Amino acid sequence: MANRHWIRSEAQERPDLSVLIVSFNTEKVLRECLQALEVASEGLKVEVIVIDNASRDQSVGMLRAEWPDVHLIETQVNLGFGGANNKAYEAARGRYIVLLNSDAFLAPDALRISLAKMEANPEVGLAGGRLISRDGGLQPSARSFPALTTHILVMSGLADRYPKSKFFGQADRTWANPMEPADVDWVPGAYSIIRDEVLREVGFFDPIFFLYYEEVDLCYRIKAGGYRILYWPDIVVVHIGGESSRQVKTLEMSHTGAQLVLWRMRSTLLYYRKHKGALATRMVQMFEVFWYQLREWRNRMRKSPQSSIMARDFARMRKTMQLAWTETKGGRVSPPQPW
């Protein structure tokens, strides 16, 4: 194994980069993530903080045995993505904070390029790179803030049908050349680099978001503070999350899938209420209920076994959005955590 060069937490020297990694039952991919991170850290002053979100696998044992220079923080309960990163940030000492998913693998030059670009562009508060799957396929990496229009375009399938249209493809900027850098609204939390003084000015993740929308809200506040959000395509990160989360259309929604849908809906309502107001929040909720009801009716009319399964799923999603509306009191209250 290569010699470690990460700065330990007790060292007096301030790191250039504090890499925060949240892990929840991700032993195998976490090992691969750290191996790629070690290569990408060469020649840089880096501290690595892994916060284990009450995993039930052998992640903690693996970290202690194989990665002694990692600053490990263990939680007793799952704090969610935002809450766990907030906890890790309390220990971070770097001039820049790097968010890295445990299922994301840095290209060898990703950190070096990130640091150089942030140093050269002091007006940039947060930046992200080009996320790709293992087979090289592009994942959404540079996105626009949610709005009722984009919500409708994505849910209706029009965004997927006309990806090269600036209007229909506005949510994920699918019309844009992914090899060109750009000012954007937000980038996914799978990888981003953030100026520490910006976080101290605007705050880190809002604790109302347990999962989903936390990075959208953070980017919103950073831009509101007068800083730029940049997408830099020459920063390459392999991310397998998009592969594992693809929905299998022919199976009934699992318990885990239903839980994640509920969390997404809660966070949607919380975000819209915080940034768009009561009317926009109600309109988003009504549209989703209407859309799921329409899809449910359509599938019930088809009379095939697969259509019956999909009809039940859409009925569950309609009821789940109604539940999310009740639980968040129309987006005003975050339910008790952990969700």
Image: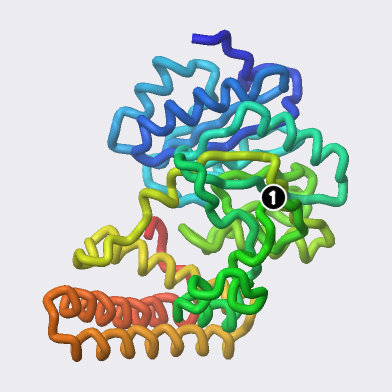
Judge from the rendering whether residue 297 lies leftward or rightward of residue 156; answer left or right: left
Residue located beneath label 1 in the image: 179
Q: Residue at x 60, y 54 (%)?
A: 141
Q: Residue 312, percent across and down? A: 20, 78
Q: How many marks?
A: 1
Judge from the rendering whether residue 151 lies leftward or rightward of residue 16; answer left or right: left
Q: Quadrant of residue 10?
A: top right
Judge from the rendering whether residue 120 lies leftward or rightward of residue 197; answer left or right: right
Amino acid marked by disc 1: Met
Q: Residue 72, percent across and down? A: 49, 28
Q: Residue 169, percent across and down? A: 60, 72
**Which image quarter holds the C terminus?**
bottom left
Judge from the rendering whether residue 241 lies leftward or rightward of residue 217; answer left or right: left
Q: Residue at x 54, y 51 (%)?
A: 138
Of the pair 27 and 64, the residue shown nearer to us: 27
Of the pair 228 and 71, the residue shown nearer to us: 228
Q: Residue 29, percent across and down? A: 40, 33
Q: Is residue 149 visible?
A: yes
Q: Residue at x 58, y 54 (%)?
A: 188
Q: Secondary structure at mark 1?
A: loop
